[in-house]
Amino acid sequence: MATAYHNLSDYDFNSVPNAENMRFGIVVSEWNNNITGPLLEGAVTTLKKHGAKDENILVQTVPGSFELTFGSAQMIKSGKVDAVIAIGCVVRGDTPHFDYVCAGTTQGIAQLNAEGEIPVIYGLITTNTMQQAEDRAGGKLGNKGDECAITAIKMLDFKQKLQKTQIL
């Protein structure tokens, strides 16, 4: 569903499992920090609302969005987290750089999900204008960081339930 039809921060609080025993890694791009900062704040606040403990939220920065894949992979290898949230922001400019960064980052995160045992949540905002990014980082369309946190909790719950299921 397009964000224009759904506020990123609207969700049913009671539909989200308790995150008390879950460990989260957040890899956040320093580039466009005016956007990634509020996204990070939204993710951390939402994780805590659902029971995540401060000591179970590990935050690391990378220079730009393209580096989110490497940062996420390293966080997974550390063994310190159960899920990773990758947060970045790419705003279209005058060159094809936007297309390469968006495609490469998207493909890298998708590959980590397809081949890995730990969910990596796609928190990359890709917009045509800075205003569109601001609208998705706590502006009129909510905060993508909130949505990423909820997704991380639900994916860990999904994994835990699947692991408990036994087919006879």
Image: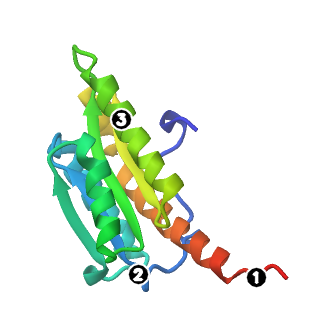
- Disc 2 residue type? Gly
The image quadrant where one finds the N terminus is top right
Q: Residues within 10 Å of mark 1 (few under 14, many from 20)?
A: few
Q: Which mark is residue 40?
A: none
- Disc 3 residue type? Gly
Q: Which mark is residue 51?
A: 2
Which residue, given by chain and number where applicable, does mark 3 sit on? 104
Which residue, given by chain and number where applicable, does mark 1 sit on? 166
Residue at x 29%, y 65% (from the top left corner): 75
Q: Residues within 10 Å of mark 2 (few under 14, many from 20)?
A: some
Question: Which residue occupies the foreground of this view, 20 or 82?
Answer: 82
Q: Secondary structure at mark 3?
A: helix
- Looking at this view, name the residue that lies furthest to the top: 94
Q: In the rendered image, which quarter is residue 93 located in?
A: top left
Q: Secondary structure at mark 1?
A: loop
Above or below, 164 against 10 in this view is: below
- The residues tagged by marks 3 and 1 sit, at their Cα atoms, a distance apart of 37 Å
- The residues tagged by marks 2 and 1 sit, at their Cα atoms, a distance apart of 28 Å
- Looking at this view, name the residue that lies furthest to the right: 168
Give left or right: position of 61 versus 92: left
Above or below, 138 against 76 in this view is: above
Residue 56 in picture, x, y percent from top left: 31, 80
